[in-house]
Image (tube, rainbow, N blue to C red):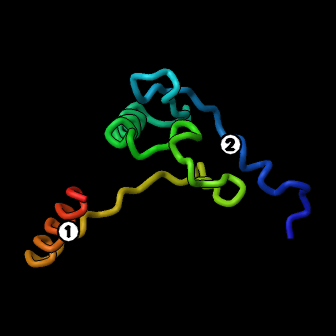
Amino acid sequence: MDSREDPMEDNLTPREETKEVQIGSLLSKIAYLGTNLSPKEESEIVDILKKNIDLFAWKPSDMPDIDPNIMCHHLVLDIGVRPVAQHKRKGGEEKRKAIIKEVDKLMKA
């Protein structure tokens, strides 16, 4: 049992210094990155965020059906551990064709 009054309180603030990075063309689309990232890591993260900008909710109106009292997502990261990319998984030719077919079907929906 956590003896703190609000156990989430410590998780609401970053454990290290951060800097603001503009992701989109709008000033409201910003992200905060740790200052201890190498220039290469920072560039890779910013590139990923820019490529996937449409996947993020930038304001509450982007997620109208989600009540923040019920659902709230937090990423808990250990600053002593560097991120590791997963290896690419190879599938058989039949599986690859089925995946492409399913993705095409979903894209048309």
The residue mark sitting in front, 1 or 2, is 1
Residue 67 versus residue 48 in the image, above or below: below
Horizontal side of residue 8 vs 15, given as left or right: right
- Please provide percent x and percent y for residue 1: 86, 71
Quadrant hosting residue 86: bottom left
- The residue lying toward the viewer, choosing from 53 and 69, is 69
Q: Secondary structure at mark 2?
A: loop
- In the rendered image, which residue does mark 1 sit on? 102
Above/below status of 74 relative to 60: below
Locate residue 48, reporting x and y percent: 35, 42
Question: In this orientation, does residue 37 appear?
Answer: yes
> At 15% from the left edge and 77% from the top edge, which residue is drawn?
95
Numbered circles on residues, count: 2
Q: Which of the two labelled residues, at mark 1 and mark 2, occupies the earlier sequence position?
A: 2
Q: Gap in Å between the C-alphas at discs 1 and 2? A: 42 Å
Q: Position of residue 40 (x, y in %)?
A: 36, 35
Picture coordinates of residue 102 (x, y %)? 20, 68
Instruction: Classify mark 2: residues with Cα within 10 Å, few (<14), some (14-19) or many (20+).
Output: few
Residue drawn at the location 25% of the way across and 59% of the way down: 109
The part of the image, by quadrant, that contains residue 39 is: top left
Q: Is residue 109 left or right of residue 39?
A: left
Query: What mark, if any, has residue 31 been given in the picture?
Result: none
Residue positioned 29% across, 63% down in the render: 87
Residue at image location 65% in from the left, 38% down from the top: 16
Q: Secondary structure at mark 1?
A: helix
Look at label 1 and name its amino acid: Glu
Query: Quick check: can you spot residue 76?
Result: no
Disc 1, disc 2: CB below 8 Å?
A: no
Q: Quickly name the residue at label 2.
A: 15
Relative height, residue 73 to residue 91 (above, below): above
Q: Amino acid at mark 2?
A: Arg
